[in-house]
């Protein structure tokens, strides 16, 4: 049992990765192309998006499909397991949106106190 608890670190690394959760959230409405994800996830570099997508694919959270069209393109879609992750993470993402302004204010207050 203790070994299982320690091994859950691997799963928590997925959940704790800010880019992974944002990608999972972006895929909630169905498949998306790399360029769509890159455009809509503010602040993510092309390299980080590539690495995160590969990690999520390796973990079975999403699938990568190469479409045989001209020009060729690739799309990403949540697997069944990925959809359960999205459902589990949704309350956390909602909480963050709901409390974002309060967190930003607390940071400003803290920073102004620490400069005194």
Image (tube, helix red, strand yellow):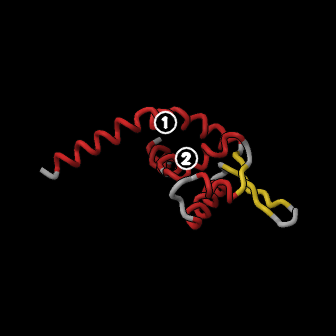
Q: Are marks 1 and 2 in contact (CB under 8 Å)?
A: yes
Q: Is residue 72 left or right of residue 46?
A: right
Label 2 crowding class (10 Å Cα cut-off): few <14, some 14-19, many 20+? many
Secondary structure beneath dot 2 equals helix
Above/below status of 94 relative to 14: above
The structure residue drawn at horizontal position 62% and vertical position 58%, both measured from the top left corner, is 38
Looking at the picture, how far across and down is residue 63, in whole percent? Answer: 72, 53
> In this picture, is 103 found above or below 7?
above
Q: Nearer the viewer, residue 43 or 23?
A: 43
Q: Which residue is mark 2?
A: 21
Q: Is residue 5 left or right of residue 80?
A: left
Q: Identify which residue is drawn at 87% across, 65% down.
A: 70
Q: What is the number of the mark on residue 92?
A: 1
Direction left: furthest residue: 116
Q: Position of residue 48 (x, y in %)?
A: 55, 63
- Image position of 71 (left or right of 90): right
Q: Secondary structure at mark 1?
A: helix
Label 1 crowd (10 A; few <14 / some 14-19 / many >=20): few
Percent of width and height locating residue 91: 51, 32
Residue 39 x, y percent position in the rendering: 62, 56
Residue at (70% x, 40% y) in the render: 29
Q: Earlier in the sequence, mark 1 or mark 2?
A: 2
Task: Find residue 102 and report its image quarter.
Answer: top left
Please give the name of the residue rendered at 34% of the width and 42% of the height, measured from the top-left corner.
104
Using the image, tell me which numbered label, if any, was put on residue 18.
none
Q: CA separation, marks 1 and 2?
A: 10 Å
* Depth check, front residue: 60 or 87: 87
């Amino acid at each position: 049992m203790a070994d299982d608890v320690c091994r859950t670190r691997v799963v928590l690394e997925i959940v704790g990765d800010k880019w992974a959760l944002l990608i999972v959230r972006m895929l909630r409405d169905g498949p998306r192309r790399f360029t769509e994800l890159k455009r809509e996830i503010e602040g993510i570099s092309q390299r980080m998006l590539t690495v995160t997508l590969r990690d999520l694919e390796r973990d079975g959270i999403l699938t990568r499909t190469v479409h045989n069209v001209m020009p060729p393109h690739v799309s990403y879609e949540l697997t069944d397991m990925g959809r359960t992750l999205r459902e589990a993470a949704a309350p956390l993402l909602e909480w963050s949106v709901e409390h974002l302004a309060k967190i930003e204010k607390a940071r400003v207050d803290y920073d102004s106190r620490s400069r005194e």
